[in-house]
Amino acid sequence: MNDFSAGSQAAVLPLFSALVALTLLICVMAGPDRDDLTNFYTGYLSLTPLKNGLAIAGDYISAATVLSTTGIIALAGYDGYVLAVSTTMSLVLLMFLLAEPLRSVGEFTMGDVLARNMPGRAVRVASCVVTLSATLPFLVVQLSGAGSLLTFILGMPHLAGARTVCIVLVGSLMIIYAAIGGMRGTAIIQMIKIVLLLLTSIAVAALVLNRFDWSSSELLRAARHGSGAGPAFLQQGLQLGTSAGGRLDFISLQITVVLGVACLPHVTMRLYSARDVPAVRRSMSWAVGTVTTFCLLVIIMGTGAAALVGSQHITAADPQGRTSVLMLSRALGGDAASPGATILYSAVAGMVFITLLSSVAGMTLAAASSLAHDLFAHVARRGQAEPRTEMTVAVWTSVVVGTVAMGLSILVQEWDIGVLTTLAICIGASAVAPALTYSLFWRGFTRTGLLAALYGGTACALLLMVFSKAVSGTPSAVFPDADFALFPMRSTGLVSVPFGYLAGWLGSRLDHRRRAADSRETRRLYEESEARLLASAE
């Protein structure tokens, strides 16, 4: 492995440098004026449906999808296949249920959607809190993983100092992208990322299938053998177990993914950059087609990693299998000194690098936009902030969010913090999804119900996750030597999602009884926009 890494660094380092230089130049050229909020938050609504669809797909496909899902498929087979399908279904749900209504009433952030019928500082604050709760854990996981992955790619010693340097490098670039590029700059980076992802993944998947004479049965047979699990590789249970509790946990995870991934703030924010409702409809068609294609390629690559690399070698490099796609490129390249092996490994490494950069940039932009637009402009300045002032705050909040995420990532780089990805998705499913669906489709939804859904769903997901088996009580937990697990699952969705919806409904019912006048006003505001919401009228 070291010989291969030393021989490929000569190609990988210039590629990384070229990608950084290109993306920084794009951000500078596409960046908004300092007093133009519409350009910063939406990119002047100037992207065509194809470009916006590619940008949505780029925001949606994070490093966790590329690396973790491939690793789960390589190590757990069937469980990883279902996860890839659930990831696609989440975007399909967003397309058919939420995309058009969100574009009809949304402006810049999730707070604009939620506050349209229930204006007030409490709603803006709650929206900002939930946005940060969903994006910051994701940021920490992506940056922490960037440290380990870049040291692996570059063949550097896997030491804390080397990982810290990589985290600071990626974190600094993500701050620049979000602060300077705004929505348009990050959109172009996402488009570059998704094109590179598709081209590289198609090449790797084709090489995998060619190795087995384009026979899926031969590929699966080799994967069963390489995984060491035999027939169990194509059965549910390798990831979470086959007991009744394991099956419930598996169902809980899939529910969480389907409802939560597409509702994450950095994904829904991209919808507001479409010109109009027909444009967002076409954009989502492109996005769903792109994500579906990529998930199929991930299934082939993960299966190929199990067949050609083997679970023992994959887990030896990383217990979660996040380096499996890189190891697969080495296995496909054959002779480590050959030009073909170097080119293939460099292409896959570049794909991973640009995915890490673009993913964290989009999340940083979403968090900074909520802080600047919801908390500063509408709470601190009561909607009276000057555009130039709000732009300045948005830039500096990008710096603050990025710096905090970098600091946390450095502190926890020795931990197995993959649970934070599950936590972020659980918050999306348990708090954001109930708040959005009730706000868009229930005329009886009130401010109290909204706050109950946002805070209640977030608190329930966070509390259950802290006391879950993913944090303590098992060898693969964050704290394997401690045992304070009171919740017998690794995902909270089976409990926290119904709790979030129930909290929103119960809060609204109680609010109707206590404040009938305010409830009638909220209902009137909803009915004024109901045709635009449900019929997608302009």
Image: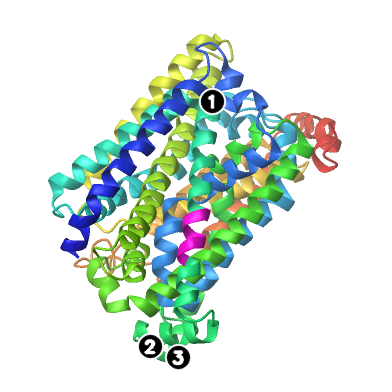
Nearer the camera: disc 3 or disc 1:
3
Label of residue 225 in the image: 2
Q: Write down the region rendered in magenta.
A: 198-204
Q: Is residue 250 above or below residue 361?
A: below
Q: Amino acid at mark 2?
A: His
Note whether residue 232 is visible. Answer: yes
Residue drawn 66% across the image and 55% down it: 289
Residue drawn 55% across the image and 28% down it: 184
Q: Amino acid at mark 1?
A: Asp
Q: Position of residue 327 (x, y in %)?
A: 31, 66
Comes first in the chain, label 2 or label 1:
2
Give the side of residue 140 with respect to residue 88, left or right. left
Q: Position of residue 328 (x, y in %)?
A: 36, 68
Q: Main secondary structure of the magenta part?
A: helix
- Label 1 sits on residue: 374
Q: Disc 3 to disc 1, how far (Cα)?
A: 52 Å
Q: Residues within 10 Å of mark 2 (few under 14, many from 20)?
A: some
- Label 3 sits on residue: 231
Give the side of residue 6 with respect to residue 484, left or right. left
